Image (tube, rainbow, N blue to C red):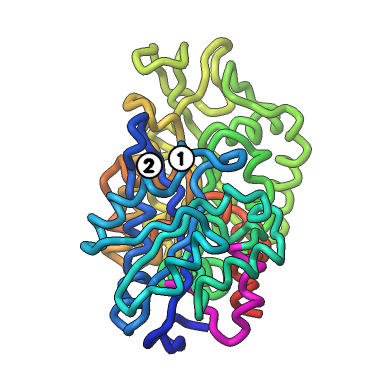
Amino acid sequence: MNLTDLDLQGQRALIRVDFNVPLNEAREVTDDTRIRAALPTIQYVLEQGGSAVLMSHLGRPKGRDEEFSLKHILPRLEALLGRSVTFASDCVEDAALDVTQSLKPGEVALLENLRFHPEEKGGDEFFAGQLAENGDVYINDAFGTAHRAHASTAVIAKFFPEDKAFGTLLAGEIDALDKVLSNPEKPLTAIIGGAKVSSKLGIIEHLIGRVDRLIVGGGMAYTFVQAQGGSIGNSLVEPEMHTQALAILEKAQSSGTELLLPADTLCADAFAPDANTQVVPTNAIPADWMGLDIGPETTARFVDAVLTSKTVLWNGPMGVFEMAAFANGTNAVAAALAKATADSGAFTLIGGGDSVAAINQAGLADQVSYVSTGGGAMLECLEGKVLPGIAAIRD
């Protein structure tokens, strides 16, 4: 069900948000991206004459722990919403119900950290029922936890059979993924980077045969190169993944997916920002040198692949972009995505994790089609898995 299908007038909307934000030692929010992402749904509920009851986890507490209390989020939440928010010292029973049952239209309440109760991660049905008492309708707007079958993300939905919906953020994530995985405009290119083949194996296997081009960059590329007999010096490698890498190359060839690997590499004699560097063929990296970024020839090929695509998914950097000396390949891909979006109307999805950090570092996050907020959830979607938090609303 869509958010616009819910009758919110005079109703308490119980909204699962993702306020798992970083805090400094003074317990102040240092990055409020996730709070901002939840604002459209909250504001919509209030505009429609409802009240909003917000629930989230924060960190990984072992039982009740003041360090992980959501009261630390309250000042930033109130500042961003431009209104006061009532804090409930628990998320169930009287401490919560005393707050949520007296809410008036236009008012907002924030429940205490869900994970103070082990029943949350355990997906306990009784606990989910207790949470459900805090609202008349249920909205899931937490894509970052949609891959977890927790009480507040999946189990709770059964208590709202006719009154449940995706929030604006979660609906946007689903729509963006559908544009890539279900109904892409062709050519479709996936750029998969990062350190390890093992962590992206499921994604690569799911995408082969679905995408027209698969670009492999970052540290994982050296496993493919070594598997084919190339010399990779001291570069990052997973020798135990050789068989899988060769199988992927074979599957790509038989399924008609063009698989692009780096032809040249910017390598260094140390893992340091001021190391000596040279550009060499990726399969001929000298002993004691390590590949830390794609080379100029590869960068040009990858950029051309992006610019000639109508749909592009990017998950994982091309090199050690945290060091300026080895950020060129990643920055060039980021710039190409922004150019493809602007010049040819390509749909460009930045899928989680380090790619989000990279596009932000390049200052181009507002120039691509969609930047996903969910790391693990995005990865599981790209592997073709059904996410419990999404399935619970659709059922």
Please tell me whether residue 296 is drawn above or below residue 205 in the rendered image.
above
Side of 257 where 11 appears, left or right: left
Real-space CA distance between mark 2 and mark 1, rounded to the nearest whole angstrom = 7 Å
Query: Taking the image as drawn, is residue 185 in sight?
Result: no
Q: Residue 317: which numbered mark, if any? A: 1
Q: Position of residue 291 (x, y in %)?
A: 50, 24
Residue sitting nearer the eye, 1 or 376: 1
Q: Earlier in the sequence, mark 2 or mark 1?
A: 1
Residue sitting nearer the eye, 121 or 85: 85
Instruction: Determine the residue positioned at 28% across, 50% down.
Output: 76
Residue sitting nearer the eye, 123 or 334: 123
Contact, mark 2 vs mark 1 (Cβ under 8 Å): yes
Instruction: Determine the residue positioned at 34% across, 13% down.
Output: 274
Instruction: Determine the residue positioned at 76% across, 45% down.
Output: 247
Query: Taking the image as drawn, is residue 364 in sight?
Result: yes
Identify the amino acid type marked 2: Ala
Residue 163 is one of the magenta-drawn residues: yes
Residue at label 2? Answer: 358
Count of marks, rendered view = 2
Magenta-tinted stretch: 152-167
Residue sitting nearer the eye, 10 or 364: 10
Please tell me whether residue 289 is drawn above or below residue 81 in the rendered image.
above
Side of 178 where 253 appears, left or right: right
Instruction: Determine the residue positioned at 56% across, 33% down.
Output: 195
Secondary structure beneath label 1:
loop
